[in-house]
Image (spheres, helix red, strand yellow):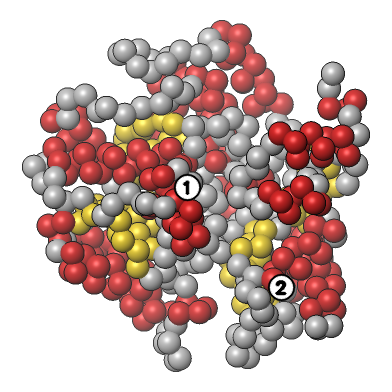
Amino acid sequence: MTYQNYSLKQLQQIDAAHHLHPFTDHKELREVGSRIISRADGPFIYDSEGTEILDGMAGLWCVNVGYGRDELAEAASAQMKELPYYNSFFKCSTPTPVLLSKKLAEIAPNHVSQVFYGSSGSEANDTALRLVRHYWALEGKPEKNRIISRKMAYHGSTVAGTSLGGMEPMHKQLGGAVPNIVHVMMPYAYELALPGESDHDFGLRAAKAVEDAILEAGPEKVAAFIGEPVMGAGGVKIPPVSYWPEVQRICRKYDVLLMLDEVITGYGRTGEWFAAQTYGVEPDTITTAKALTSGYQPLSALLVGDRISATLVEKGGEFYHGYTYSGHPVACAVALKNLEIIEREGLVDRVRNDTGPYFAKALQERIASHDLVGEVRSIGLMGAIEIVKDKATKERFLPSGSAAVVVRDHAIAQGMMMRATGDTMILSPPLIWTRDTIDMACDRIAKALDLAQADLRKH
């Protein structure tokens, strides 16, 4: 029996009876019932009742080539028929992870040539943490094991990912983080810049927080700094251009490794294959997942710089780490075809030269002036809209985050899938969006803001 044989109510009842959702208030969900997304095509998703919704989040930051790509289904099918699974343990490999690793080395920054596979960004960040600490132990410096991260960072929801991240509610529920991880200020100028402070100077000050943490611990104890090039789940917080070059300078000065979490920004989101290239930095590790397969299969790839990989190979012996599905042949086959589509259709160049600049202009011209909007910002096809009660003072509605939820609900009702994070609305659409799609999105967002304003001003 297929899902078409069930009514929406029946599906919701079964969902409530058996399915625990991620990042969900389960009592609240059972009171309202899940929206059942049943199919998708191009930039649109459709619920079980046939409602068409423009997907402004690319699923969960991942469906970069859009929905309904038969080529990806065919790549998976062909690989399943030939070799559905074999592991990468016991000195074995399969063709697709071998070829995918070659491709990733070609598009990655020049100093990155090795890849370690998992199934999610969380797994990849777990791997990165273990690998970085293992590297320093191999170099005879096991005490160099502290990781510096940032407040409001998101690096996954495994124990290590939660610990690396800087979200306090997640830390509280964890009840005991991985030790020797500290968190410093984020480069969020809208709320943290001082009166009259330029973006350039703020970027340097935010970077100095990393240096201060290194000096507080002692450089001989600090293994690495980890950061998302653009903080995604924390609210698309885009750093000033002065920030990342200064962070890199500081890391090099104190011999601290630089770990980039590009689970969201990787594979074209910022108008380059990787945001490391956008910001001109040379990280020692790059965590990737999501858009590697455009979400059609679960797969992560930790890209490892030559400094670490050379030590691992020459001095490491056995690295006691890995997953059943590391280098899964079907997922890697889909990734290869997905990267081929991105390259063939010129999606990275399109984001850099056409849709990214048009997206920024449209948000500024059509959304920024709204009474509820304190700021809009974007990079490539990734944007944020700050929701405020007063534009001049940046005063927020109370309780915190409540207004953005009102905007979100109106947006979805207008056929526009957006996400509310705190007091910020965020966007991360498929890279197949065109200027017409961007115009459609702005029309629906503007309408949602008007409707939300009418609701919020009543109280």
In which quadrant of the rendered image does the N terminus lie? top right
Mark yes or no: residue 276 visible. no
Identify the residue at horizontal 45%, vertical 91% (top origin): 195
- The residue that label 2 is drawn on is 403
**Percent from the top left, x then y, of residue 453?**
80, 78
Q: In this view, does 96 lie above or below 290?
A: above
- The residue that label 1 is drawn on is 156
Q: In which quarter of the image is residue 401?
A: bottom right
Mark yes or no: residue 194 visible. yes
**Percent from the top left, x then y, of residue 364?**
67, 74
Q: Quadrant of residue 381?
A: bottom right
Instruction: Out of 20 and 316, give the one closest to the viewer.
Output: 20
Identify the residue at horizontal 31%, vertical 44% (top origin): 129
Q: Is mark 2 on a helix, strand or loop?
A: helix
Q: Is mark 1 on a helix, strand or loop?
A: loop
Q: In this view, does 66 lie above or below 359?
A: above
**Amino acid on which the number 1 mark rests in the picture:** Gly
**Amino acid on which the number 2 mark rests in the picture:** Ala
- 372 displayed left or right of 229: right
Q: In this view, does 43 lie above or below 427?
A: above
